[in-house]
Every structure is written in structure tokens, then in C-alpha cells.
Image: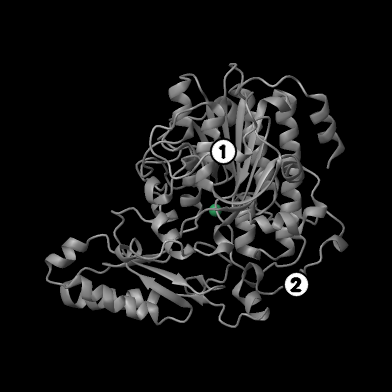
Amino acid sequence: MNPALLLLLAGLGAQPSPKPRLVCVITVDQLRPDYLDRYREQLNGGLALLLKRGASFTDAYQDHAVTETAPGHSTILSGRWPAHTGIIRNTAGVPDSTAPLVGSPGPGASPVRFRGTALFDWLQAAEPGARALSVSGKDRGAILPLGRAKAQVYWYSYGAFTTSHYYADSLPTWLQTFNAQRVPFKAAGKAWTLLLPERAYHEPDSVSYENSGHDFTFPHRLPTDSNRAALAFLATPGMDSLTLALALEGMRALQLGGRGATDLLAVSLSGTDYIGHAYGPDSREMHDQVIRLDRSLGWFLQQLFVRYGSGNVDVVLTADHGITPFPERSRALGHPGAQRVVPDSVIRGVNAALDARVGGADWFGFESGMLLLPDRSKLAALGVDVDSVVTAVAARLGALPGVTRVDRPGDLARADTTAAVVRRWVHSLPSDASVELVVTLQPYCIWSYPNLAIATHGQPNDFDAHVPLVFWGPGFRRGVYPGRVNTVDIAPTLARLLGLTPSEPLDGRVLTEAIASQD
Ligand SMILES: [Zn+2]
């Protein structure tokens, strides 16, 4: 481990206060837990510290079916499945045209679809002055960990961090000053190079299916046009160090942890996700990203310890989902059925047939493995036997190569919920979700669109659902915990640690095995 970090830990053994001054929850978008084993020898920063000194759960899951960013982030500090948070897929996650961004043309966003409460609401109920800051490269990554709370919530859009009018009508001075440094614009023309000597990377760099066949070897140079560079900046390791720098700046400006009570800092780091989609989980790019993330997190934690004392901060590290390997790679490794499954033509076909019969173009939608019918009663009122149409679509979807099962949501509740796939779908679907069918793919297959060749996630398989979960700090008992746990356990565990009472029934449990005894 970084010697400076060790010294700091040793030197700052100040008496811990009964409750931490700060709880810092770090979500690394798309971080698969096997990366931590794979690159363990080369980790010496924040990831190394958390793994070595923290309470590390090696069998943790986002235990729902639609393993996307929005549903994943909705579970982490709510303690509830997407079936109960109401955030079941990205496209019906935070987009909100009535909440435009402040000073940015990016899409409007808010948590209006989020149901119920989250940890920060419980903290505020106990401590009316409690403060929270949440930052991310993505709107959903910043918004959903705080539920519906109107706190300080900022995300990246076109080269700067902003918020939406749901939260505020202007940006605070400290954020304007931060944005005025224009770090992403100044990265124009700069190259992403390997951090370690080339011999430290064992995976091949010239893999021609990566990044849609373009620019798949190091170094990766950002566009020389500064506006284009600011867009491309999202898919570089610099995005995470910038987000962490923003978190520190906001923490100082808002004086988090300065009231003698606990405040909350939520950080969602998006770089791993953008890099993983483009280059895949087994790429040299992912390897370098994880090493760089480790170093950035080491620097970040060091700053937290300097400010608060290491005895006054509790840290959680987890992820919103994992990722399935490129099908091209899986086929080469002996999984001949690995493929991209594109359901578009089936859905277009059924919509065209209905259009010819009763008019209306887009009755059915298909997203994230779900057949959606927003207006079932209207279609039925036009004399269509909806059930028989759905049965016919189920047969056509079931016949697509790569599909392993098609279920009606109503049948799942009666099925064997010890089967991971069934249980994960049940955890994903609210009863009022307008979902007619759920479709599960065979191992190593991924959903796709015509002419799209990225790696992706979003299914109820372990590649996508298995995530890291580490608690670090005076409240936790260091060790490796092999028992099976879920991300919905994070909020109840933190609530117990902070002496808070959740305002509603939760799906998770308190991970008492990892909580240090209070006597
Ligand atoms: Zn994500």
C-alpha cells in the first residue's frame, strides 16, 4: 500500500467520535468484483486500502434482473429492490423534461419516479440540519442514491457539472469556480497512456472488435477540438479523478461533517462504465482504468482522512452492476452460442400488424429484456384480444437464437424464487409496471440493437449482478465475509450504524456481522 496512506492512518488515530462526521458512499459504475482479484498485485491506493483494512463481502449482488445504472443506483441507499423504488430501467429512470438542466443543453432529469425514502431522508428526520452532497458523471448516478431529497446533487454535462431545476435554479459559486477551470476542454489533444510499464499488462491491446473497431490500441488521444474533447472525456480515467476532485471541493465548500453530526457524501464514478462498454471487461483499457481508479481513490481517501481524521469517516464501496464479456471473446473461448440478440424486427412486426388492424403505430415497446405495453386497456377497447397477441409475441421472442426463457410477470411470483433468474425478475418488477413479458438470454448473450457492437450489461446473470461491497471505517469489523449479501443491505446497515430508523419496510438486512461492537 502507498506508504503515505499508511502513515496517515497510523498518525491520525484520534479518538473516534461516537458517530462518524462523514459517511462516504462510493459507487463505481460497472466495477466487477473479479477485477479486484485480477489486478490485486498492482493495487496500492484506495482500492488496496479498502480491501486490506475494510469489511469486504465477496459474494454481493445487485439481486434484480434489469442490471442497469438507474435501478442499481436506486437500491444502494434505499435498502429496497427496484420493484419497490419504482426505478426499473434506465430510460424510465431519471429523464424528466419538466426539470431542465441549469445552464446546459443536456436532457432534464429528476427523481420524480423514485418511490419512498432513502438513507438521507432518515438522516434528516433525525438531524434536521444534516447535509448531503452527491456527484457523478451521470444524472442517474448522482440523483438516485439520495432518493427524492432536494440536496446538493451535481452531474456532468457537456464539459461541466450542473444540476436540474428540480434541485436549484442556479449553480453555487464554488461549483462555478470549479467548472471555470475547464479541465475537460483543456484535455483536447492529450493522450491516455498506460500508467505502468507495458510489461505489467498481460492482455493483448490489438483486439479489433473493441471500441467498434476504431482506436483500440494505446495511446488514446482525445479530439483536438475542445468541445469534442469534453464529450470524449467521459470515457477516460480523467473523468473519475475530476469527479473525486469535485466531491472534495464541494465537501469543503459545504463544510460537510462540520456540525458535530453526520453528513453524507455520495460519489458515483462513471469512467469504468464508459470504458467497459467501449473496450470490454477483459481489455487492456479496463486494466489501466482500474489501476488508475485505485490511485485516484487513494488520493481522495487521503484527503478525507486529513480533513476528518480516519477515525471519523465511514466509507462504503460498491457498484451498480457488472458487465458481460464481448460475445466475440466468449465465442473464441469456447462458448459458441454467445451472441448479440436484436429483438427489433419482432416488435416492429407486431406493431405493424396492429397498426394495419386498428391504427396506432407503437403499441408495444421492448427494452431491457421486457415487452412493454403502456396502453393495454386502450388496445383491448379497440377489440384486440391482447392476451393472444402477447402469447404470439412470446413465441416469436422465445424462438430468437440466444433467448433461454420468456415469462409473464404474473407467473413469476408462483415460480421457484430460489432460482436466481426468477427471483431477480420478481425483485425488478412493480405490480403496475405495464410489463407483459420478461425475456432472459442464454449465458454469454447480450441484448443489442442493429449495427451496435459494444459490450453491455442489463441481465439477470452473475456477470452483470455480482458487485463488490466493502465497508471501511471505525464502525466496521475488518475481514473477508464470504456470505451471500445484496446491495439492499447497505442502507439498513448504515442506518443501524448511525442509529437511524428507516421510515418504511426495507428489503435488505443489517449486516451485523460486519458492524464493530459498540461497547
Ligand atoms: Zn451503470
Question: In this orientation, which residue lies closer to the viewer: 487 or 141?
Answer: 487
**Which amino acid does the dot numbered 2 rest on?**
Ser
Estimate the x, y position of residue 294 in percent, counting from the top left.
Answer: 74, 46
What label does residue 206 carry, if any? 2
Estimate the x, y position of residue 160 in percent, counting from the top left.
Answer: 58, 41
Which residue: 18% across, 66% down?
A: 379
Query: Image quadrant of residue 198?
Result: bottom right
Crowdedness near tag 2: few (<14), some (14–19) or many (≥20) residues, C-alpha within 10 Å: few
Estimate the x, y position of residue 115 in percent, counting from the top left.
Answer: 36, 42
Crowdedness near tag 1: few (<14), some (14–19) or many (≥20) residues, C-alpha within 10 Å: many
Q: State whether residue 53 appears in this view.
A: yes
Query: Image quadrant of residue 134?
Result: top right
The residue wearing badge 1 is: 135
Image-based side of 462 in relation to 169, left or right: right
Residue 233 lies, with reference to residue 367, above or below; the image says: above
Sequence-wise first label, 1 or 2:
1
In what element is the residue under mark 2?
loop
Residue 184 lies, with reference to residue 131, above or below; the image says: below
Answer yes or no: do the residues labelled 1 and 2 have beta carbons within 8 Å?
A: no
Question: In this orientation, which residue lies closer to the viewer: 337 or 109?
Answer: 337
